[in-house]
Amino acid sequence: MTSTSTRRQLRRKESKQDRASERTILSVNDRRDPRVRTVILILNVVVIAGLLISAAGPLLWLLKSAISTSQDILAAPLQWWPSGVQWHNLADAWIRVEISRYLGNTVLVAAGSWFFGILVATTGGYALAILRPRYGPIISAAVLATLFIPAVISLVPLYLTILDLPVLGVNLLNTFWAVWLPSAANAFNVLLAQRFFTSLPRELFEAARIDGAGHLRVFVAIVLPLSKPILGVLSLLTVITAWKDFLWPLLALPDPTKQPLSVALPRLQETAETSLMMAGMFISVIVPVGLFLVFQKQFLRGAGQAGALKG
């Protein structure tokens, strides 16, 4: 009797799978046709090749331009090094165009934005998802409402705020604090962390509280170790946003010696050679690409959370 019922369940499962596959454009019988499979294979190769060209093509062209002469870039942009490979462009851009200084400023801006952004996102998400205060839904609604406000509208009040910080009365203009603190108040990151923390099993928190653990210990010893996927996503999003931001660092850091690469490169374009500019742009791009390669596992694992929230 047991084997008979098991066979019936397997047949039902197979029939359901067949019916599900029949709902696609191509049925199971169509996929068994060698000609159809050949066409599908060709389409897959074409699509993958197109994605590779569109994704890696600009980066490869930037690398090619970074080690070419200015004349080759302007006269023959699609030819492979007519005058030879100019590896010294990278060193010249690092020293002569002072890419090293602006890259250091960019690293400081990104590191501070990452630290304060992760701090605000995780603590805010923990308070709304785990602690659940009575006024939590009101705060969540208020945070969500800020996502519908265009960022351009908040530029003027934000600029006036850093000129005269409330309560403290401090002028943060031309300091990295003027970039770090506003970037930390990211509503999307807070809601993303809140959504992830809500999916964690509450039995762990209840058991920890029974053992006498406080809110801080629960946050440090339980929540953060279980949140590595979402922390990788938040880290990547925060660093990339700070790395490529242009308008706000331009307003908050008018001193050229403190500006990041995103602000300095357009200004240097007026005086620097084209080849050195391309080399500087390549140096500025390679760091975010490397960060994605390092955090790609965490990013892809937690990207579903971001997509669900955005949707």
Image (cartoon, grey):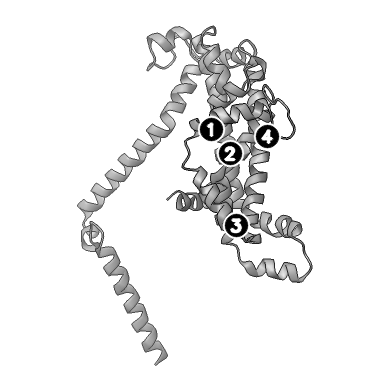
Q: Residues within 10 Å of mark 4 (few under 14, many from 20)?
A: many
- Residue 43 vertical position relative to residue 261 in the rendered view, above or below: below
Q: Secondary structure at mark 3?
A: helix
How far apart, in angstroms, are the residues tagged by discs 4 and 1?
21 Å
Circle 4: residue type: Gly
Q: Earlier in the sequence, mark 4 or mark 1?
A: 4
Front residue of 192/268: it is: 192
Circle 3: residue type: Gly
In x, y percent, where is residue 172? 69, 26
Going by the picture, which residue comes out furthest to the right? 212
Q: Which mark is residue 136?
A: 3
Tell me whether circle 1 and circle 3 mark residues in contact (CB < 8 Å).
no
How far apart, in angstroms, are the residues tagged by discs 4 and 3?
28 Å
In x, y percent, where is residue 244? 54, 29
Residue at the disc numbered 1: 154
Q: Secondary structure at mark 2?
A: helix
Q: Earlier in the sequence, mark 3 or mark 2?
A: 3
Q: Earlier in the sequence, mark 2 or mark 4?
A: 4
Q: Secondary structure at mark 4?
A: helix
Instruction: State left or right for residue 222 relative to residue 45.
Output: right
Tell me whether circle 3 and circle 2 mark residues in contact (CB < 8 Å).
no
In x, y percent, where is residue 14? 32, 73
Q: Residues within 10 Å of mark 1 (few under 14, many from 20)?
A: few
Q: Residues within 10 Å of mark 2 (few under 14, many from 20)?
A: many
Circle 2: residue type: Thr
Residue at the disc numbered 4: 112
Residue at the disc numbered 2: 238
Residue 82: in sight, yes or no? no
